[in-house]
Image (spheres, rainbow, N blue to C red):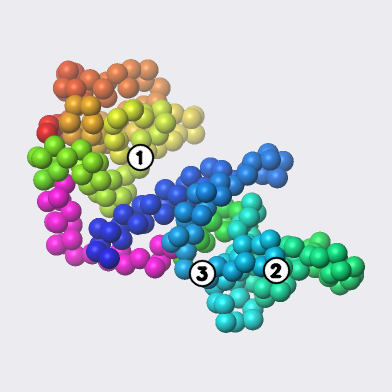
Amino acid sequence: MSYKENLLTKIAIDRLVDRIKASIGTVESGKRIDKALLKQLMGYFPWKPRQERDLELYLENETAGKTRILVLDNDLTIYNTTVDDVVLRKSPTVKEMVSIRNAIKILNDSDVVVSKKTRSLETIQSICIDRLDLSYTPADIDEMAREGVASLDGGDADGVAESLMLFAELLGLAPAPKSFGMPHHELYGKVDEKPSGEVTFGPLVMYSHVHGTLTCLETVLSSRDKERLITLKAVAAGDARPLPRARRSSI
């Protein structure tokens, strides 16, 4: 794959992981992990799938006796043991539970558990991304920039949005927090949350699907500013008095 394709794949993986994290809850919450999103993430995961009894397993090394094994369930547990041992602990038969030795294993699996839930998800994310070649040359960046400019000049809204997303990833810019989100607008920028709970956003880049405008604001906006969205909408439409150090381009 090209550098751009690998970068798009990384972004897709990161976004899936963020959405799955939001679906993970405590035992008391009764919240269930989003299995549909998890299945999508497994499409990038290189471990070998294997079905044992009612368990959906992923093995790091299917030829080794003892290996890291992911159980695809609400706990998202990664074990370091054998398949038979995982099956015994996670899905024992009545006959297996009669054994005191087996019962001890079933009741306490801390000796073979590597991680659970969020920590396991972060491991999966790291393994998926490590497979990608994210090295690049100046020519790769120049090509992505040319494609973005061509999309902007040609009125290709989807192309502009994709280019903006790619360069935001390269520059470490985050999508707009909820308090700054606007329908039909793509916003990326520096995000900071203060101990008081105030969220600041900026400098930022905004693309408006409504007006076909691309704006760079080097101003920092605050979640405590009640007119922040009115200001952003006005700037996107070209109806506002320019904010300090604001630059705007239009399709």
Nearer to us: label 3 or label 1: 3
Q: How crowded is mark 2: few (under 14 residues within 10 Å), some or many (20 or more)?
A: many
Q: Which mark is residue 47?
A: 3
Separation (CA) of disc 3 from disc 2: 16 Å
Q: From which residue to which does the magenta span run?
A: 128-148
Q: Which residue is drawn at 51% across and 69% down?
A: 47
Tell whether position 147 is magenta: yes
Q: What element carries label 3?
A: loop
Q: Which residue is drawn at 14% across and 50% down?
A: 147
Nearer to us: label 2 or label 1: 2
Q: Which of the two labelled residues, at mark 3 and mark 1, occupies the earlier sequence position?
A: 3
Q: Which mark is residue 175?
A: 1
Mark 3 and mark 2 residues within 8 Å of each other at the beta carbon:
no
Please name the residue that numbered disc 2 is placed on: 86
Q: Locate residue 223: give its quadrant.
A: top left
Separation (CA) of disc 2 from disc 1: 40 Å
Q: Which of the two labelled residues, at mark 2 and mark 1, occupies the earlier sequence position?
A: 2
- In x, y percent, where is residue 126? 46, 62
Taking the image as shown, residue 211 lies to the left or right of residue 224, namely: left
Mark 2 and mark 1 residues within 8 Å of each other at the beta carbon:
no
Q: Which quadrant does the N terminus fall into?
A: bottom left
